[in-house]
Image (cartoon, grey):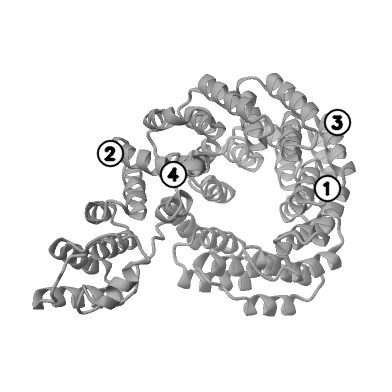
Amino acid sequence: MTFKILCMALLLGLAACAQTPIKENLNTEETKESAEQDDTSQLNLPKQELTAPILFDFLVGETALQRGNLDIAMNRYIKLAKNTRDPRIAKRASEIALHAGNAQAAEQATTLWLELDPESAEARQTIAALLVNLGKLDAARPHLEKLLASEKDGVGTAFMQLNQLLSRNPNKAATLKLVQQLSQPYKDLPEIHFAISQAAWFANQHQLASEEMQRALALRPDWEIAAIHNGRILQRVSPANANEFYRDYLTKYPAAYEVRIAYIRQLINDGALESAQEQLQFLIDKDSQDPEIVLAIGLLAAEMGKLDITESSFKKALRLDYKDPSAIHFHLGQIYEETKRFDQAMESYQLVKSGARYLPAQIRYADLLALKGNLQEARENLHKLPASNDQQTAHLILAEAQMLRRVKAHQEVFDILNDGLKKLPDYPELLYDRALAADKLGKFKILEQDLRKLIKLKPDSAHAYNALGYSLAERGSHLPEALKLIKKAVELSPEDPYIMDSLGWVHYRMGNLVEGLNYLNLAFAARPDAEIAAHLGEVLWMKGAKEDAKNIWRFALEKDPDNEVLLETLQRFIKKKAID
């Protein structure tokens, strides 16, 4: 078993519990023959008669295992391992403990397994990984040293895999120290310096991280992953030095496409779009036949708003048999939507056949179907989609509610969300959406009940505080509490223009016109939305700036003629004969 397999298994909690039945006589010839194929082949296995207590413990352990009672099975097998001194049973106990997620019991069982079979690489790997996960780095060190020494020519690769395991340890300073200790015999390997660099970076020793990554590149100059990491390190310290490094490196190694992709991404982040475009064009002109590179070109072009390049790159990646065509079809569907080619978007979403994007693609297909006027067919499509967990169930409910909300079927929206909350009573998004639906129907008691519950479930939900505060302000009810709620929302999400709009609105409702106008101006400047315009115009009007108010409303009406809040505001002023 390699470091990688072991580390991934332990970190994900997936160490498999062997299901091979144990023979009645643990020292039969058949058992000896099978043992020749595992780590215990060189051992003199203990001669162990099947006594009544041993048989009882075995039966209890196996029965518990079959019924999913892992704690009972684990305890019985640990007891069996101690009594029989058989390394196979100790291994079985270790596997069950890992399945049960009991690291302490797994350490106990694996320690015994290694004691009984000291030549077992699998036992040593398991105990080393467990000790690292438990933060016992000093205890893990001698095991890791032996494992690395056994790798011979593969020690560089093993060190890189080991580094993935060590990076999970929260004590970054101790991890760096351990990596440096383990690296001593292997200083001529570039992977060792790469590992030290990463450990140093996580330990906030940025200068050491930079020095070690440069040592790795000195030993292996054309190592692209090291070049990319070196660029990232330099970017944190000095963006100018990072860009200079990328340019110099790409001059020496123009075919280092992964490095060029990292450089383009950095240029985009820096806002240097002209330079990014030049680098992107270089990649396009090279006409790479690597689907991964072609896909990366498309994604970078999307970040730059070059959707024509994105589309052509994605289609080329499909022609080159990219490993996950469903992902590309999903992204193409999004491009077609953004460019108003809805029929092509629907076709593309239908080509998503599997994977994590299957359900989102089918939801988008149904939503576009509804937008074309086929609401009933769209709903039927949603009802046919499988949901394998609560999150998917909730997403399907929310998607159907959104379709109905768009045609102002507010009672149906409320009913669907109400039924959804019977299945998932604490699902935050369902609570929030039902609160909004309740608001449309004047069911303010349910609105408050749902939003207050949501705040308890997610005390960091800025939108829950904002929605409740805004609702109270709209109704002129409990205005001091409304102000307090919206201020909390601003604290949680200070850049949100809609929350800033609510703050201005509640000040207006409380008679603080100057403060209200200030906040509404800030909100409108950040996002000239029709609803914010409705509020800003009303406060301007009440302040006596009637022409300014009319201009704001006129602008918003041209942009969003169907906005309910804007239309309701204008209707009120028309009824008052304040405006024509």
Q: Secondary structure at mark 4?
A: helix
Q: x, y percentage for residue 450?
A: 48, 59
Name which of mark 4 and mark 3 comes first in the sequence: 4
84 or 195, which lies in front? Answer: 84
Q: Which residue, given by chain and number where applicable, does mark 4 sit on?
A: 165
580 or 52, which lies in front? Answer: 52
Q: Residue at x 57, y 23 (%)?
A: 210
Q: Which quadrant of the figure has residue 506?
A: top right
Determine crowd level at label 4: few under 14, some 14-19, many 20+ residues with C-alpha closer than 10 A.
Answer: many
273 or 230, which lies in front? Answer: 230
Gap between marks 1 and 4, in whole Å?
Answer: 34 Å
Name which of mark 3 and mark 2 comes first in the sequence: 2
Gap between marks 4 and 3, in whole Å?
Answer: 40 Å
Q: Secondary structure at mark 2?
A: helix
Q: x, y percentage for residue 560?
A: 81, 51
Gap between marks 3 and 2, in whole Å?
Answer: 54 Å
Q: Which residue, given by chain and number where applicable, does mark 3 sit on?
A: 274
Which is closer to the viewer, label 3 or label 2?
2
Asked if marks 3 and 2 touch (Cβ < 8 Å), the reply is: no
Q: Quadrant of the N terminus?
A: bottom left
Name which of mark 2 and mark 1 comes first in the sequence: 2
Q: Which residue, given by chain and number where applicable, does mark 2 sit on?
A: 139
Tell whether 65 sits left or right of 85.
right
Q: x, y percentage for residue 310?
A: 83, 50
Q: Secondary structure at mark 3?
A: helix
Tell whether 59 sits left or right of 40.
left
Q: x, y percentage for residue 113?
A: 25, 56
